[in-house]
């Protein structure tokens, strides 16, 4: 099948969707659900007019670049003033909740997916641990939801995928038989420090320099007109690619860089961010179509009761129980914990991870891909349909008790 055929079909869909997007966004049916559904319909298990390989390098690069840009713009829009006052929530979710989620996911897989090896189960749990604020955008941008909850969920989703990258590569090396004994211990100590540390330093440095240069150029009217669309996209990709190049986590660099840019740019960031968010939305659309064609179709064919049950538990018990446990001892009310626990949607990060893992051709690859795909699609459906209604209910309950979360 010609690559031009793939391009023609996807470009046609992007055009049609973009001209009716504003209308669809006012309904529960839209966004990732439509994108992935179109991919399934046109993929090998549908009409067969889109043909993409799960382990293809182009699909991995597309997903990585999309996630990097989305992380940067989401972080740039974060309210750091609120976050500074209520940083305990995201810290507990990341340092306590995230490891518990991976551990519980591993335990659940041991019971339900006995055909996978222990390291493959650990890989699966790690792939499904990161959350995606873009799928819960109706929550993290809803001003009726308390700012600490909104910013906490946003920062959690921005950093957990970067934190999971070194963990993923450790389990991937073990599952593929590339590390054992002393090498494993070295890997466990070195990778997280390098990935997170280098990523954070690169993100800060690139954002500080980039913001300073942009400020000078805007003041001198060297940057205006259509060129306003370019710098943020380029800066986000610079943070990502530079960190990856020198051994760090590009996703950590993108999110940290976005936060630094948002803080330093102040009110000037609004105009330039709008164009970058549009580019991110377009890339996300294409990524979800590719995911639907390359992953979801085969996942439907490989479905089994244990796989679907694991997906359901991943979105409920495996996510929500660690949230409850890591928030013990805080002043958070039970309904707040439930709200935070439920809004842990799975999306772009899990797509990136399964594409990376597919390149190793592990024995349990088909089962892992099917489980990830089912979890993501159930998340898209469940979180997409409940985001607005539950946000309204939660806000109403807070109002009745005087705003205490």
Image: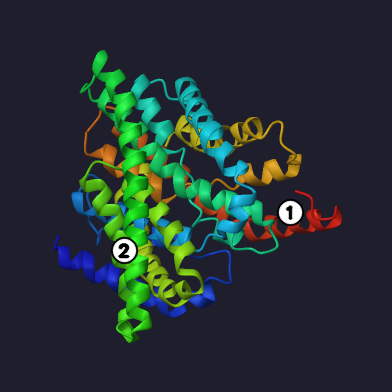
CA neighbours of label 2 inside 10 A, class few (<14), some (14 to 19), many (20+)? many
Observer able to see residue 37: no
Residue placed most toward the observer, 278 or 112: 278
- Residue found 30% across the figure and 36% down from its top: 194
Q: Name the residue located 46 percent from the left edge and 57 percent from the top edge.
A: 259
Point out which mark residue 155 bears: none
Which secondary structure, mark 1?
A: helix
Query: Residue pushed farthest top?
Result: 181
Q: Nearer the viewer, mark 2 or mark 1?
A: 2
Image quarter of the N terminus: bottom left
Spot occupied by residue 198 in the image (x, y as percentages of width and height): 31, 42
Q: Which residue is mark 1?
A: 394
Q: Please count the marks in the image.
A: 2
Q: Is residue 356 above or below residue 64?
A: above
Circle 2 sits in a helix, a strand or a loop, which is it? helix
Q: Is residue 187 above or below residue 259?
A: above
User: Which residue was labeled with disc 2?
Assistant: 235
């Amino acid at each position: 099948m010609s690559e031009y055929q793939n391009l023609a079909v996807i470009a046609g869909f992007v055009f049609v969707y973009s001209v009716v997007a504003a209308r669809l966004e006012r309904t529960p049916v839209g966004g990732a659900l439509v994108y992935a559904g179109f991919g399934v319909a046109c993929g090998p298990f549908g009409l067969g007019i889109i043909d993409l390989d799960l382990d293809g390098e182009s699909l991995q690069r597309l997903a990585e670049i999309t996630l990097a840009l989305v992380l940067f713009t989401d972080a740039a829009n974060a309210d750091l003033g609120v976050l500074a006052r209520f940083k305990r929530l995201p810290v507990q979710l990341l340092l306590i909740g995230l490891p518990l989620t991976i551990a519980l996911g591993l335990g659940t897989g041991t019971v339900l997916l006995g055909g996978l090896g222990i390291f493959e189960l650990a890989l699966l749990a790690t792939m499904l641990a990161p959350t995606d604020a873009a799928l819960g955008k109706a929550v993290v941008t809803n001003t009726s939801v308390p700012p600490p909850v909104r910013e906490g969920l946003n920062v959690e989703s921005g950093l957990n995928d970067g934190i999971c990258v070194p963990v993923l590569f450790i389990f991937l090396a073990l599952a593929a038989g590339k590390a054992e004994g002393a090498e494993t211990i070295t890997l466990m100590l070195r990778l997280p420090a390098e990935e997170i540390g280098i990523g954070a330093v690169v993100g800060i440095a690139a954002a500080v320099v980039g913001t300073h240069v942009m400020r000078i150029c805007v003041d001198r009217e060297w940057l205006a007109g259509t060129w306003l669309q370019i710098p943020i996209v380029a800066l986000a990709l610079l943070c990502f690619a530079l960190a990856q190049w020198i051994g760090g986590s590009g996703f950590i660099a993108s999110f940290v860089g976005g936060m630094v840019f948002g803080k330093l740019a102040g009110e000037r960031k609004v105009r330039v961010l709008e164009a970058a968010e549009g580019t991110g939305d377009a890339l996300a659309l294409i990524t979800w179509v590719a995911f639907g064609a390359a992953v979801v179709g085969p996942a439907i064919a490989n479905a089994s009761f244990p796989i679907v049950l694991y997906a359901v538990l991943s979105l409920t018990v495996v996510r929500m129980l660690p949230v409850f446990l890591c928030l013990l001892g805080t002043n958070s009310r039970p309904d707040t914990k439930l709200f935070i626990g439920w809004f842990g949607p799975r999306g772009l990060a899990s797509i990136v991870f399964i594409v990376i893992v597919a390149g190793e051709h592990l024995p349990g690859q088909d089962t892992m891909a099917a489980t990830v795909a089912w979890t993501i699609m159930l998340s898209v459906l469940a979180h997409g349909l409940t985001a607005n209604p539950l946000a309204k209910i939660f806000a109403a309950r807070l109002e009745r008790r005087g705003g205490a979360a």
